Amino acid sequence: MGDAAQLDRGGAVVIRGWCPGALRPMDSGDGWVVRIRPPGGRLDAAQAQAIADAAEAHGNGVIELTGRANLQLRGVTPASHVPLIEALRPHGLIDADARAEGRRNIIVTPFADAEADRLAAELAKALVASDLALPAKFGFAVDPGAAPVLTRDPADIRIEAGPTLRADGLDRAAPYRGPQDALALARWFLDQGGAPDGRGRMSALIAAGAQPPGAVLATPNPAPRPAPGLVPEGLLVGLEFGQIAPDTLRRLGRLAPLRLTPWRMVLIRGAHRLPAIPGLILDPHDPRLRLRACPGAPACPQAQAATRPLARALAPLIPADAVLHVSGCAKGCGWPRAADVTLTATGAGFDLIRHGRAQDAPALRGLDPDQLPKVL
Ligand code: SF4
């Protein structure tokens, strides 16, 4: 996680270490990154238009869908941050304050029905009102469909079919009666010493042998990994590098309500066909779905090399279920998680990391791009 800047209520900026948000942007190589958490992962036409307009007017026009189904705008500056927030606030996209924003760390299944939306809204309200001091990356998944779809995505506490409540890393769940149960499990995590220095994840606590009370119910098998194409709820479209052009976002928003996913895909709710819109991946076998890459050079002044052309060139060499991450430097902004193969640009070629993050210890160092096809 990089440094981030918080805009406080008085308008002053404080540089500190945070998970980024809209009110606490993160400093990156190409300016501030402003992360928007649309409530419930939903966007209507006006919200999609507002985000697209704000990205162009107050950022560098780059909009990225994150691994937690949020949208981040890049290239925001200290001068453009306040007008950006003012443009988005009337559309219900900005929390009351940075504290509330930081607590509303929930991924909702894009296939949510009205009941799932209700569970998510209820949980968000309870989290914002709670006094729990959870780690910044500690998150919740609302995934109550018959077969859960978010099991591979980052969350510490999961509301699944039943509804039931499951601690990440455990294969048993407890009955879920309401948000008080999710908060009680989060409090149990803290009481058990899950975050000794303010950091920690539920799966690590479970792996260390801790057992939450009441987890006796069997859990359903997860759904297969979703792919672009038709689904009962509409049409899933993929985004290369998770990036969506402002005009593409506007046009999709005008078609139907949108649901954001943590899979570099957007669900166009209720759609069955799509007009020709450039930049969307519709083929589930498209190798671009395997790629992660930050903007790299020349967009980012910290980049040691261009990233996306190299990632595109190597995509056909990556197995269908694997992820290739090409990072312009060891910060790893484009994919802060482990990938099957990560290539990190350094001043002396690329380091290759297997099953790790951009800053992890490499298996091979200083590779020339020409060597990479052979190595992979
Ligand atoms: S990871 Fe990429 S975007 Fe982030 S600072 Fe490095 S080069 Fe820039």
Image (cartoon, helix red, strand yellow):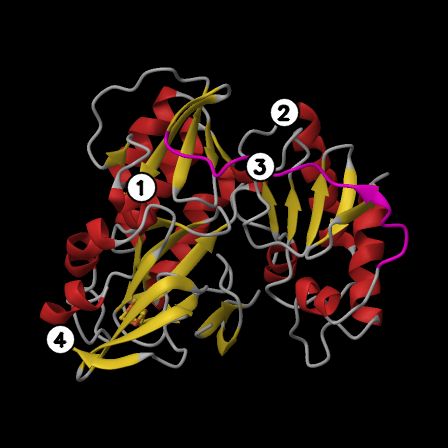
Q: Residue at coordinates 48% horizontally, 39% vertically from top-left?
A: 225
Circle 1: residue type: Leu
Q: Residue at coordinates 43% horizontally, 68% vertically from top-left?
A: 26
Name the element at disc 2: loop
Circle 3: residue type: Thr
Circle 2: residue type: Asp
Q: Which percent across, then down, holds residue 90?
A: 50, 40
Outermost residue, left side? 370
Q: What's the distance in space between the residues labelled 4 and 3, CA to CA?
A: 41 Å
Q: Residue at coordinates 59% horizontally, 61% vertically from top-left?
A: 98
Nearer the camera: disc 4 or disc 3 = 4
Mark earlier in primary sequence (4, 2): 2
Residue that mark 2 sits on:
113
Which of the 4 image quadrants contains residue 50? top left
What segment is highlighted magenta in the picture? 212-228
Q: Residue at coordinates 69% horizontally, 81% vertically from top-left?
A: 197
Q: Is residue 355 above or below residue 184?
A: below
Mark 1 residue CB less than 8 A from any atom of ligand 1: no
Residue that mark 4 sits on:
368
